[in-house]
């Protein structure tokens, strides 16, 4: 909130959504947000969090992200902003960062932000080569089935109080939310679908322009173009 000429204002929508830019997939989120007409910025330090409505914690390598967050004290800054109303969306490694409990890991190596009451298992499908795509309906998010890209994805195994599942596949949860956070174990930013970005914007109470789609020659294996496997 800001005060101007005695009037209390909500932060204007110019503030928009930030994408944590320490490691992992950033540019694809910025592109999706730009396509939706949403102001977005990279978040490398505490000052970049100023006035944001939401923050995307992107996919990448959670053990690396946790160390980088801790080094710069950004873990505490994010937790403080979160307590003050910042909405968070964790994708894959980002979902690991948000989880209160990570199964089968040494706690000191994976001391997450722990801001969402979920239990998660890292690398639950095997190695990078066991990555895959699905197209599934997520009724709360979009009327049409959405392409979903799972890259060395985790599984959400337990949802705490106030957390609800948005997508269940074969007995595990692949997307969940509570009032302030969203987690997806897959990567909507690596598909042409804007549905999850639109959904997160609405969670952040940001008004969106009319519906848009990405003009792209996307194929189910397009994500390997970003991360070629030799
Ligand atoms: N397996 C990675 C981790 O736990 C996550 C992979 C991803 O974000 N695509 O950090």
Image (cartoon, grey):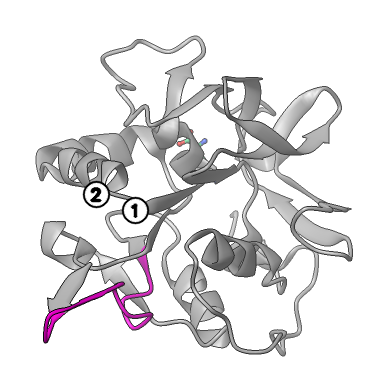
Residue that numbered label 1 is attached to: 86
Question: Front-most of 178 and 23?
Answer: 178
Observer-nearest residue: 194 or 127? 194
Query: Callout 2: few (<14), some (14-19), or many (20+) C-alpha neighbours within 10 Å?
Result: many
Asked if residue 102 lies left or right of residue 151, the reply is: left
Please state the horizontal and vertical placement of residue 14, each as a whole percent of the image: 33, 83
Magenta stretch encompasses residue 103:
no
Q: Which residues are magenta?
A: 4-18
215 up-or-down from 87: above or below: below
Residue 81 badge: 2
Q: Is residue 181 above or below residue 123?
A: below
Looking at the rendered structure, which numbered label has been put on residue 122? Answer: none
Mark 1 CB near ligand 1 (8 Å cut): no
Judging from the image, what secondary structure is the residue with disc 1 in?
loop
Farthest front residue in view: 6
Q: Helix or strand or loop: what does disc 2 sit on?
A: helix
Tally of numbered tags? 2
Q: Is residue 99 something that shows in the picture? A: yes
Using the rendered image of the protein, determine whether residue 91 is visible from the camera's viewpoint.
no
Residue 202, image x, y percentages: 57, 65
Mark 2 and mark 1: span between their CA atoms?
A: 5 Å
Crowd class of label 1 (few under 14; some 14 to 19; many from 20; radius 10 Å): many
């Amino acid at each position: 909130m800001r005060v101007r000429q005695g009037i209390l204002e909500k932060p204007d929508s110019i503030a928009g959504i930030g994408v944590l830019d320490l490691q992992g997939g950033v540019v694809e989120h910025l592109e999706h947000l730009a396509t939706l007409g949403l102001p977005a910025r990279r978040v490398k330090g505490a000052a970049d969090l100023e006035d944001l409505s939401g923050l995307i914690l992107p996919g990448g390598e959670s053990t690396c992200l946790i160390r980088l967050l801790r080094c710069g004290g950004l873990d505490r800054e994010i937790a403080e902003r979160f307590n003050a109303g910042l909405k968070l969306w964790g994708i894959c490694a980002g979902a690991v960062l948000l989880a209160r409990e990570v199964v089968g890991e040494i706690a000191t190596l994976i001391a997450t932000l722990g801001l969402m009451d979920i239990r998660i298992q890292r690398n639950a499908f095997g190695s990078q080569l066991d990555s895959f795509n699905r197209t599934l309906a997520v009724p709360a998010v979009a009327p049409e089935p959405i392409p979903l890209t799972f890259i060395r994805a985790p599984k959400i195994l337990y949802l705490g109080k106030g957390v609800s599942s948005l997508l269940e596949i074969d007995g595990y949860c692949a997307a969940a939310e509570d009032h302030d956070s969203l987690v997806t174990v897959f990567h909507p930013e690596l598909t042409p679908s804007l549905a999850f970005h639109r959904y997160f914007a609405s969670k952040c109470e940001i008004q969106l322009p009319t519906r848009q789609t990405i003009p792209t020659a996307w194929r189910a294996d397009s994500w390997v173009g970003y991360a070629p496997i030799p």
